[in-house]
């Protein structure tokens, strides 16, 4: 397992451009607007893969834990699965390309540029899923207020 993690980490460090992995660069609309389309697609795929990998790791860890009941195990795993599904997406609901296009549209509005990508993923999924424009606008306004407070 340690070998797999080291190999995966090495591949990421080699493949991703330096500015994509620097911790001091926030992954917000300003960052999104200045990276290539291939990096955008890679970022979205990486998020999806990361969430799926975490789900598998949780599954492995909890299955091996002696101190957790089976019902607690399934409750925790199901909560995480729901979180992943609502925050990001399942590929049957939205494609990676649609997610990139949705993020492009959202960040096309200058007012949204300071919002971190993680805050926008659920909103984009709702937009592609057919939520009303009024609802999307209300969520976007709330996100703008929240991220303005953080600065």
Image (tube, rainbow, N blue to C red):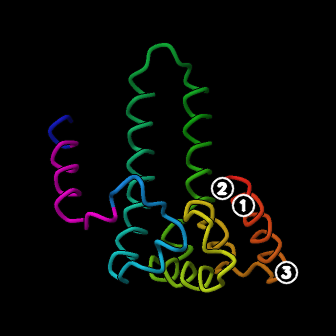
Residue located beneath label 2 in the image: 151
The percent coordinates of residue 99 (x first, y second) are 52, 77
The residue at the point 20 percent across, 65 percent down is: 15
Q: How far apart are marks 2 and 1 (CA)?
A: 6 Å
Residue located beneath label 1 in the image: 148
* Image quarter (top left, top right, bottom left or bottom right) of the C terminus: bottom right
Q: Is the residue under label 3 in contact with that under label 2 (CB below 8 Å)? A: no
Residue located beneath label 3 in the image: 134
In front of the other: label 2 or label 3? 2
Total marks drawn? Answer: 3
Q: Is the residue under label 1 in contact with that under label 2 (CB below 8 Å)? A: yes
Question: Label 3: how many residues lie within 10 Å, few (<14), some (14-19) or many (20+)?
Answer: few
Q: Left of 80 or right of it: where is 26?
A: left
* Image quarter (top left, top right, bottom left or bottom right) of the N terminus: top left
- Span highlighted in magenta in the image: 5-20
Q: Quadrant of residue 13?
A: bottom left
SS at mark 1 in the image: helix
The percent coordinates of residue 116 (x first, y second) are 57, 62
The percent coordinates of residue 34 (x first, y second) are 42, 79
Q: Distance between the residues labelled 2 and 3?
A: 26 Å
Q: In this picture, is 71 found above or below 130?
A: above
């Amino acid at each position: 397992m340690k070998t797999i993690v080291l190999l995966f980490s090495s591949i990421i460090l080699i493949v991703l451009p330096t500015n994509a992995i620097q911790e001091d660069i926030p992954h917000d609309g300003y960052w999104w607007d200045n990276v290539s389309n291939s990096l955008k697609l890679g970022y979205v795929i990486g998020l999806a893969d990361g969430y799926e990998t975490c789900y598998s790791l949780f599954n492995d860890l909890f299955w091996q834990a002696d101190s957790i009941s089976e019902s607690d195990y399934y409750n925790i795993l199901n909560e995480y699965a729901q979180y992943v599904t609502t925050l990001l997406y399942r590929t049957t609901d939205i494609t990676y390309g649609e997610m990139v296009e949705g993020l492009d549209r959202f960040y096309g509005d200058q007012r949204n540029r300071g919002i971190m990508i993680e805050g926008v993923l659920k909103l984009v999924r709702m937009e592609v899923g057919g939520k009303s424009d009024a609802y999307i606008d209300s969520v976007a306004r709330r996100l703008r207020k929240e991220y303005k407070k953080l600065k």
